[in-house]
Image (cartoon, rainbow, N blue to C red):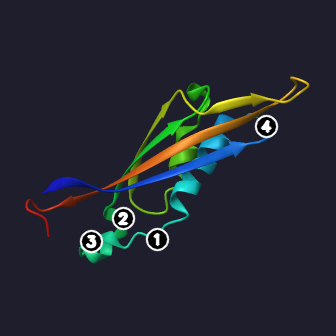
Amino acid sequence: MALKRMVLEIGMGTDIRGNDPTKAAVRALRDALWHNSLGVAKALGLDTDDMKVEVRIGVPRPEEVDKAAVLAVLPHGTGTVEVVPGGLEIPNEEGTDRTLIAHAGAIVWLDLPEGGR
């Protein structure tokens, strides 16, 4: 058996007034996942929970992201979360608040027999 990369999903999420990196990260992953319906696992005779999902989040202040909250977004499979510096922070005119933008990449892997199925 060998892990094979099957899908890359990409999303963006924001927290317009709260400046919360976790909220933006969760929204970014939802954006990446909720626009797809992956049938690849079933097409290969596997269960959707056999998917291994590698989540990468780019967000300002990555150390403030609750990785468990991001991982809880996954509807199927098991996953890991890596958070790196990225995204954007845009202050309002008064300088009293910020809009925060996060980016997400979700890489879906399946464990397939050598030589494919």
Counting residues from the N terminus, which is met first, the one under dot 1 or under dot 3? Answer: 1
In terms of sequence position, does the residue under pointer 1 or pointer 4 come before the other? 4
Q: Residue at x 46, y 71 (%)?
A: 37
Q: Which dot marks residue 46?
A: 3
Given contact means CB atoms under 8 Å apart, are the residues at marks 2 and 1 in contact? no
Element under disc 3: loop
Where residue 107 appears, x then y in whole percent?
38, 50
Would you name the residue on which mark 2 appears? 49
Residue type (three-letter) at the residue carrying disc 2? Asp
Q: Which residue is mark 4?
A: 18
Binning the other alpha carbons within 10 Å of mark 2 as few (below 14), some (14 to 19) or many (20 upward) gives few
Nearest to the eye among marks 4 and 3: give it: 4
Residue 25 sits in quarter: top right
As helix, strand or loop, the secondary structure at mark 1 comes to loop
The vertical placement of 28 against 101, above or below, is: below
Residue 104: x and y, percent? 52, 45
- Image coordinates for residue 57, horizontal then vertical, percent: 51, 39
Which three-letter amino acid code belongs to the residue tagged 3? Leu
Instruction: Compute the Cα span from label 2 to label 4.
Output: 34 Å
